[in-house]
Image (cartoon, rainbow, N blue to C red):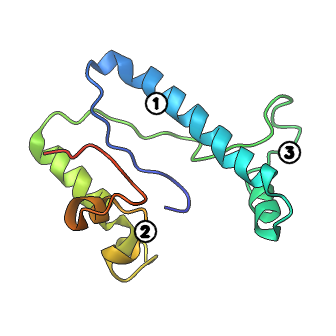
């Protein structure tokens, strides 16, 4: 998705979730910012870096902000709810009007599950 990355995670004990998510978000943000900096000769990289930039009055040590200000996480306890969330994630690109068919979204979990395509996105299959 252009403005967020849905994640369905099954790490084990619920108390480990916050630290796992924090580490994942920090590493992802570092890569999302680092790559355009390293390729700033490209116009689209410079444009991309301008979007998440925060004004200096917001925070004196923070230069960028990625993702929503609010984070919507919750625990999924049933197989039915897990399947519902997974289906929602699969269908999100079509629902948002980004593509007309699920197979057209390159980083789609649907491609992994239904086309066995792990060329862009590899994951553990939830059953």
The residues tagged by marks 1 and 2 sit, at their Cα atoms, a distance apart of 24 Å
| Residue that numbered label 3 is attached to | 55
The residues tagged by marks 1 and 3 sit, at their Cα atoms, a distance apart of 26 Å
On the rendered structure, is 94 left or right of 113? Answer: right
Q: Nearer the viewer, residue 107 or 83?
A: 107
Kindly state the secondary structure of the residue where label 1 is placed: helix
Q: Position of residue 53 (x, y in %)?
A: 79, 49
Kindly state the secondary structure of the residue where label 2 is placed: loop
Q: Residue at x 32, y 35 (%)?
A: 74
Q: Position of residue 33 (x, y in %)?
A: 71, 46
Q: Position of residue 127 (x, y in %)?
A: 12, 45
Residue 81, located in which quarter of the rendered image? top left
Looking at the image, tell me whether mark 2 or mark 3 is earlier in sequence order.
Answer: 3
Kindly state the secondary structure of the residue where label 3 is placed: loop
Q: Residue at x 55, y 58 (%)?
A: 3
| Residue that numbered label 1 is attached to | 21
């Amino acid at each position: 998705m252009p403005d967020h990355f849905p994640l369905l995670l099954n790490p084990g004990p619920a108390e480990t979730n916050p630290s796992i998510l924090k580490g994942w978000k920090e590493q992802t943000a570092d890569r999302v910012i680092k790559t355009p900096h390293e390729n700033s000769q490209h116009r689209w990289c410079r444009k991309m870096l301008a979007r998440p930039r925060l004004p200096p009055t917001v925070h004196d040590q923070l230069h960028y902000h990625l993702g929503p200000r609010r984070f919507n996480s919750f625990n999924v306890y049933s197989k039915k709810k897990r399947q519902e969330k997974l289906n929602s994630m699969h269908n999100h690109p079509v629902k948002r009007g980004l593509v007309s068919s699920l197979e057209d979204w390159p980083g789609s979990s649907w491609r992994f599950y239904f086309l066995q395509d792990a060329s862009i996105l590899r994951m553990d299959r939830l059953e």
